[in-house]
Image (spheres, rainbow, N blue to C red):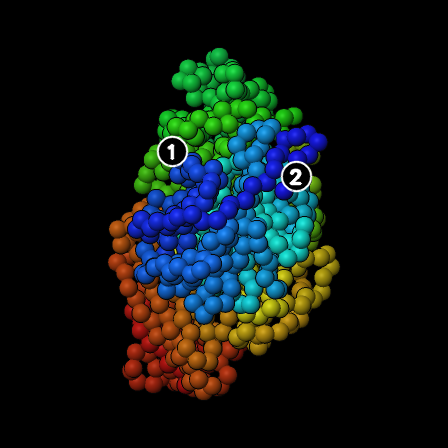
């Protein structure tokens, strides 16, 4: 097939011919044509890796994405030969490799097609830049929807879209802008109730077409490297997400304070202004745990320095903030100022650690400090050196680091020229291959440095650019957004998409980074942000002087904003438990409705609703002046959070949306653990854990995870898992609690608050003891409230 253009940069497309031989080595299968080799590796019963050598020679098998803990554990696999294909079988799937052309068809054990090649693997020589462009095309199944790919600012269902991964500083991006900052080559397919995933582990510029060019064909390709992808079978989409985390790794638990509220601005300076911000939070009683310092804290934007004029006593300042309960997070960019008197620059150049152009000259580009050079984070020696630089910040009292501009971004150029060379852990490659992992590896080195120098405290890292696997060490945010209602909508879909793409620890710049929100927009954004794993206000108000703190919009809005930040803090044990599920299993913290009700086709194109964890269904007010909103509820029983009104799922319901509320529902049968009000994590000992219990018929399960909230003792068993089981009937409520663990929590009591009892209760029984009458004090606005010792195991209400 001739596809050469007038520029002559592309060549004829090539396709595999007939299989001539094959062999099996353990759980690897090799199929040989006259030129091409297919390596098929059975990793588990539901995960299969496909790797192609177009001209018979495989490239180095190396990945920055893979978890070091990835284990091969198929229960059973075998191969059968048929006249037209080879069939590799596991206990869950069948993989057919066509003898004629290596085309792949994957079915379940009952023969239902899960995924099927169209032309399958093919390639062409990239005449202009070298190497090959590698392609894979697949048939779109009837009604198929596609999800994932990181932070794409568009509808969750990607059907009909053509997209690209090439990390880009997209200042002030709009809906459908592509590409953006992150490079996550992982997507889902869903059809006929069957979910699967494809992780295309290739760091070159990668592209995806989900039925845009031809509505019955999807494809993905890369302008270099190998066709190397992992197929993941669910059939549940959440199981696909967990298997992807098995491949690319799971997050570590963050310090609990990192799940609190963060306040950031470009820029808070001098030190007096930073103190004023902290004092204002405490004076107004608005909870906050983290304050950020943007580039103006540095001496002339030189990384790892402090401005002598603006921050003459950084250690004293950070200690003062710490005494008030604040953790300080500082920005560190990759651009190192060209300055012979600057020790970091001297080391970088003398050690040969800077990125170089093809002719050997240092890669120089303008960023905030002016002319800069840039560390080559693909070199392990550079990563180790970079990690060591964080000792001084840690000793000063810094508790978190914010990596920005690491796509990498360069003024005027946009990013590095493609001829820039990188070590790539000993491979020596061009920027074409290293671009999409530059920020990924910068944040990895940053996290390693903080982890070492903050020990025993857990580090907090936030990065703008990322590749698959970044979740192992960093959080992310959605980048330079705008103060607009459209961007409030984008914040919701981007954080949902990031969550199912492996990066749950994500948030947006609340209120918008660019521009000035009014009080209504900021309040509605705070309401949404209260249910994102990362909750941070950030604004580019350096030039305008506009203030974007929770009290900036007048007392009416401040009261509502304060109430939702307080709600966030009450929900910390629930949020931390949800993070534990993510860290332990890779379960997304935010779950689009299509991921929790995939057999309900009404959910496949929904964008507004998502679950935060197992039990909270969240929507957001998406337009100014909105008085009510229609919200789709999946099957089950749901309670409106603010008045306990009960709804039956499987339908859309309309709820009022006064400024004091947002569409928030709790799943029937859930136990939602809560703290009392806090101003910051660690403000006081938690002496009582509140259990908000919602009546649900049948058997339901909930869980609470708890540990010290910092340090690493949890890795040696210092944690608790508290499991709740509710078995209730129309005139009978029973809650059982099972406790396992070795962590000594402070609280000694639970305050159990039971919502939605469909009968008039008269008595309660604790641990099989005598029935006690319910007193008037036990009943408050239809909620039964009972104080119990922490050791209780069963509560029955009749």
- Residue situated in front as seen by the camera: 368 or 122: 122
Location of mark 1 (residue): 449
Instruction: Give coordinates of residue 73: x percent, y percent.
Output: 32, 55
**Disc 1: CA contacts within 10 A as few (<14), some (14-19) or many (>=20):** many
Q: Nearer the viewer, mark 1 or mark 2?
A: 2
* Extreme-right residue of the structure: 625
Residue at the (53%, 58%) spot, across then down: 116
Instruction: Give coordinates of residue 128: x percent, y percent.
Output: 60, 28
The tag earlier along the polypeptide, 1 or 2, is: 2
Is the N terminus in the top left, top right, bottom left or bottom right quadrant? top right
Residue 131 appears in view: yes
Please say if 60 is above or below 79: above
Instruction: Give coordinates of residue 125: x percent, y percent.
Output: 56, 34
Circle 1/circle 2 CB separation < 8 Å: no
Left or right of 316 in this view: 493: right
Choose top left, top right, bottom left or bottom right for residue 445.
Answer: top left
Location of mark 2 (residue): 3
Choose top left, top right, bottom left or bottom right for residue 733.
Answer: bottom left
**Disc 2: CA contacts within 10 A as few (<14), some (14-19) or many (>=20):** few
Element on which disc 1 rests: helix
Residue at the (71%, 57%) spot, across then down: 623
Residue at the (65%, 25%) spot, across then down: 412
- Residue situated in front as seen by the camera: 690 or 453: 453
């Amino acid at each position: 097939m001739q596809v050469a253009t007038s520029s002559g940069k592309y060549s004829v497309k090539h396709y595999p011919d007939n299989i001539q031989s094959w062999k099996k080595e353990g759980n690897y299968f090799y199929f040989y044509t006259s030129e091409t080799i297919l390596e098929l590796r059975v990793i588990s019963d539901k995960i299969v890796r496909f790797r192609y050598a177009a001209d018979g020679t495989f490239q180095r098998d190396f990945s920055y994405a893979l978890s070091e803990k990835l284990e091969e554990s198929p229960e059973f696999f075998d191969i059968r030969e048929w006249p037209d294909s080879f069939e590799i079988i596991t206990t869950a799937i069948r993989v057919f490799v066509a003898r004629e052309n290596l085309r792949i068809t994957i079915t379940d054990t009952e023969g239902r097609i899960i995924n099927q090649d169209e032309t399958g693997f093919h390639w062409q020589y990239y005449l202009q830049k070298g190497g090959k462009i590698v392609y894979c095309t697949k048939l779109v199944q009837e009604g198929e929807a596609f999800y994932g790919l990181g932070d794409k600012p568009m509808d969750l269902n990607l059907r009909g879209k053509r997209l690209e991964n090439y990390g880009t500083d997209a200042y002030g991006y709009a809906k459908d802008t592509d590409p953006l900052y992150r490079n996550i080559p992982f997507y889902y397919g869903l059809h006929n109730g069957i979910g699967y995933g494809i992780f295309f582990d290739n760091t070159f510029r990668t592209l995806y077409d989900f039925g845009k060019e031809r509505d019955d064909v999807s494809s993905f390709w890369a302008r270099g490297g190998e066709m190397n992808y992992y197929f993941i079978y669910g059939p549940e989409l959440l199981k696909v997400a967990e298997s992807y985390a098995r491949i690319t790794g799971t997050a570590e638990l963050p310090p609990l304070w990192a799940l609190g509220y963060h306040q950031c601005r470009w820029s808070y300076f001098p030190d007096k202004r930073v103190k004023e911000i902290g004092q204002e939070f405490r004076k107004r009683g608005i909870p906050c745990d983290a304050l950020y310092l943007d580039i103006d804290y540095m001496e002339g934007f030189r990384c790892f320095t402090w401005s002598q004029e603006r921050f003459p006593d950084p250690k004293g300042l950070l200690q003062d903030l710490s005494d008030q309960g604040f953790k300080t997070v500082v920005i560190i960019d990759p651009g190192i100022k060209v300055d012979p008197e600057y020790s970091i620059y001297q080391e970088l150049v003398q050690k040969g650690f800077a990125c170089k152009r093809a002719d050997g000259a240092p890669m120089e580009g303008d960023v905030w400090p002016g002319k800069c050079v840039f560390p080559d984070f693909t070199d392990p020696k550079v990563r180790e050196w970079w990690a060591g630089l964080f000792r001084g910040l840690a000793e000063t009292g810094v508790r978190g680091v914010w990596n920005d501009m690491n796509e990498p971004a360069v003024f005027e150029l946009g990013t590095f020229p493609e001829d820039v060379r990188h070590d790539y852990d000993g491979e020596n490659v061009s920027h074409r291959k290293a671009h999409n992992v530059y920020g990924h590896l910068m944040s990895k080195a940053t996290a390693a440095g903080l982890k070492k120098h903050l020990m025993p405290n857990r580090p907090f890292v936030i990065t703008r650019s990322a590749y698959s696997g970044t979740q192992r060490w960093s959080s992310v945010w959605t980048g330079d957004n705008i103060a607009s209602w459209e961007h409030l909508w984008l914040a919701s879909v981007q954080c949902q998409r990031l969550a199912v793409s492996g990066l749950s620890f994500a948030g947006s710049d609340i209120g918008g980074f660019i521009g000035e929100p009014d009080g209504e927009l900021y309040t509605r954004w705070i309401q949404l942000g209260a249910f994102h794993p990362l909750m941070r206000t950030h604004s580019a108000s350096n030039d305008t002087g506009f203030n974007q703190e929770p009290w900036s919009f007048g007392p009416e809005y401040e009261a509502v904003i304060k109430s939702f930040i307080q709600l966030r803090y009450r929900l910390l044990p629930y949020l931390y438990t949800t993070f534990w599920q993510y860290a332990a299993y890779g379960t997304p913290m935010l779950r689009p409705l299509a991921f929790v009700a995939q057999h309900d086709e009404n959910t496949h194109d929904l964008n507004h609703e998502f679950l935060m964890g197992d039990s909270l269904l969240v929507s957001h007010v998406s337009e100014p002046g909105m008085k009510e909103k229609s919200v789709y509820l999946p099957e089950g029983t749901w309670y409106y959070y603010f008045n306990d009104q009960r709804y039956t799922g499987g339908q859309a319901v309309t709820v009022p949306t006064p400024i004091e509320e947002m569409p928030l529902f709790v799943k029937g049968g859930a136990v939602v653990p809560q703290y009392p009000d806090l101003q910051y994590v660690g403000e006081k000992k938690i002496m009582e854990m509140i259990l908000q219990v919602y009546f649900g018929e049948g058997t339901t399960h909930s869980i609470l995870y708890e540990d010290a909230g910092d340090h690493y003792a949890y890795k040696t068993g210092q944690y608790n898992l508290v499991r709740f089981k509710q078995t209730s009937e129309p005139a009978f409520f029973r809650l059982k609690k099972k406790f396992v663990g070795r962590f000594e929590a402070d609280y000694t009591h639970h305050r159990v608050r039971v919502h939605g009892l469909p009968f008039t209760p008269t008595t309660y029984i604790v641990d099989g003891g005598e029935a006690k009458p319910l007193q008037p004090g036990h009943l408050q606005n239809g909620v039964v409230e009972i104080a119990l010792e922490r050791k209780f195991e069963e509560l029955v209400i009749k």
